[in-house]
Amino acid sequence: MEKQFKRTLVTCALPYANGPVHIGHLAGVYIPADIYVRYLRLRGEDVLYICGSDEHGVPITIKAKKEGVTPQDIVDRYHSIIKDAFTGLGIHFDIYSRTSSAVHERNAAAFFRRLYDDDKFITRETEQYYDPEAKTFLADRYITGTCPKCGNPGAYGDQCEKCGSTLSPEELIDPKSALSGSAPVKKKTKHWYLPLDRYEPWLRDWILERHKEWKTNVYGQCKSWLDGGLQPRAVSRDLDWGVPVPVEGAEGKVLYVWFDAPIGYISNTQELLPQSWEKWWKSEDTRLVHFIGKDNIVFHCIVFPSMLKADGSYILPDNVPANEFLNLEGDKISTSRGWAVWAHEYLKDFPGQEDVLRYVLCANAPETKDNDFTWKDFQQRNNSELVAVLGNFVNRAVVLTGKYFDGRVPEDRSPEAIDAETLAQILPCREALEKYVETFHFREALKEAMNIARIGNKYISDTEPWKVAKTDMDRTASILRTCLQICADLAIAIEPFLPFSARKLRGILRVGIQAGTDHRAGEGAPTENFYAPEPVPGLHTAEPSGEDLVLRWDDLGRSDLLPAGHVLGEPVLLFSKIEDAAIQVQTDRLAAIKAAREAAEAAKAAEEAARRVEPQKDEITYDDFARMDIRTATVLAAERVPKTDKLLKLSIDTGIDRRTIVSGIAEYYSPEDMVGRQICILANLAPRTIRGIQSQGMILMAKQGDGKMRFITPQEVVANGAVIN
């Protein structure tokens, strides 16, 4: 029998505060989590929704050094950008805090100390890379070199971002310190480790036997890690940014970010609910659900549960729904390459269209495999689905009601079988929607919500009330009453997915919506049981008055949600068409980013090619060299050899004589470039006829690794015929 819980604690992977959030983050973690929380609240369940910025770790210190600011400056900047972006998209956590808070520092240090005092760690002295010039140990990200897998010269000590390979610093070819550019050396250092191998038998039973219901990508990745054998994992590192390790002899060491960050979920709960946080983390009546991306599966399914198990007083996650990755226009989203659609920029570029992005990212969510976001698909889904199906149905129903019945819900004066048959289709949609949300299949759940709009659209098109009204107003009344009941169903069904549009629709219908407790006010403050997003400037957000109707989730599928005579609000469009010009701006921006990247990559490749050196030729003797008569000369005249692309005919003053040399340098130098230039020639090369011209000698050139040719010329002007030896 499935365990029944009194409450649900939902956490989202803490976004890393060294950059904004992008659509990959939203599709993978935050929109699915928000849909789930909104759904549970609509069901009247007690839910706590926790997140915050992950603000420690090496990438933040690297970015700070590059910009010449402090790590705190970096995290303050991006914490604000990220938090505002979430709010702008209607993603409302009960608390969105940060791991640089005083509450978290105390809590993370205390968590470490409890495990330390209980001998749950082991210590190891190992050799790690050290920068003798900067006088500091180097984290993996502070070491760069050539990737052994793909030859990328800019790979990091933990990953090659070009080929995606996971690396260790020892694998890099020609490693360098990112701080000083010097070659690092190995130096001994002591750290504390969590012996994951001790927890392997328990993890095998807990995951592989007791959580077979987890998503296949999550279960499969966990099984792969366990089958490969777990190893102790360091919980501290040599760094000056993070939570200091709270034991003697740990000066200059902080908690490793993977150990530090998940404790942030607990810290943020304590910050919000200092008196009652334990019921959310230590009561078996609480269901814990982690929403993460696939790159965080090992930390949330193996590492963090092992930490909680080692402490012994915390509940364990009941489910860890993780999505795959979202690509952008056929290419991997990359923060470092700027290949992304940033949430905060989207909000500026598409004001009032927050739900369009939520809709597209859910409809195209990478739930079982990597998926692709394209701006054309974004436009098509908005125009042909949100505008043409959902928005069109609601607008027709409300506008016709205003036209024929003065904006009041009409009575059911002349019902027909099609009315009841249509309304009967709503409840199966609700049941399917519930099943999909509760099993974390949000893409399919959204389809069911949209199916209600499709049912309504088909019904109003089949019954044609605008035509019926010419001869039968009683039948028109029943048709529009049925349409408005479907609109009320939609006001409930789309709330988890499209909160801004649901709020607009509630304003049009003048209905409220009942939901579970909102904990955002914090402990000791009155809580609301009426759930709605925060108002957004410029958005129509008319809420019902106290005497108006309040809908509940369990009302979805009823046939009498709006009573006859109920007065509707002003009709407004739920969605607007997105024009080609708006999409062109976005595709042009990406094209410019791609062109700049390709140009930079080409320039870098050319630079690397130019530095490539050909192997040394076979050994010769001095006598071999002495036989070559190398002299200085000056070009007197130059012309192209007819019907050739590469050949120039040069008249040369060698100091001995005047002669002709034919040289294949026309692709690098024009005749005008050559006249008056002093060069070096091999004077005693046997003559050779080229295109009917006798060539008497050879010009000496330097050939780079990229194939480009350059003259070898005296640094100072010398007399023609001077011997080079």
Image (cartoon, rainbow, N blue to C red):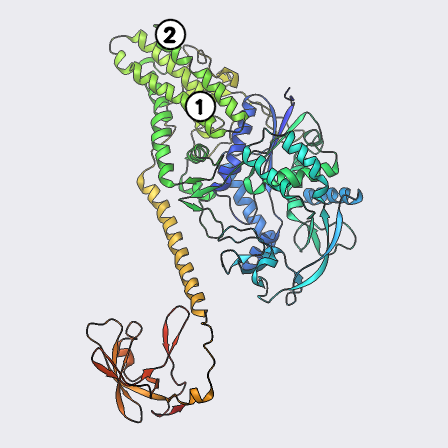
| Front residue (pair 504, 664) | 664
Residue located at (55% from left, 59% from top) = 66
Is 291 positioned to the left or the right of 130 in the image?
left
Residue 306 placement (x, y as % from top left): 69, 39
| Front residue (pair 721, 363) | 721
Helix, strand or loop at mark 1: helix
Residue 680 occupies quadrant: bottom left
Q: Is residue 120 above or below residue 576?
A: below
**Quadrant of the frame with the C terminus:** bottom left
Residue located at (60% from left, 29% from top) = 212
Residue located at (61% from left, 53% from top) = 58
At label 1, the amino acid type is Glu
Q: Is residue 519 above or below residue 4?
A: below
Q: Is residue 525 above or below residue 598?
A: above
Image mark for residue 448: 1
At label 2, the amino acid type is Asp
Residue 558 placement (x, y as % from top left): 46, 13
Earlier in the chain: of badge 2 and badge 1, it is: 2
Tags 2 and 1 touching, CB below 8 Å: no
Is 378 positioned to the left or the right of 305 in the image?
left
Helix, strand or loop at mark 2: loop
Tag count in the figure? Answer: 2
The answer for how far apart the CA atoms under marks 2 and 1 are is 27 Å
Examine the rendering and report whether any part of residue 301 can be seen: yes
| Front residue (pair 665, 112) | 665
Q: Nearer the viewer, mark 2 or mark 1?
A: 1
**Quadrant of the frame with the N terminus:** top right
| Front residue (pair 317, 479) | 317
Residue 459 placement (x, y as % from top left): 34, 16
Image mark for residue 412: 2
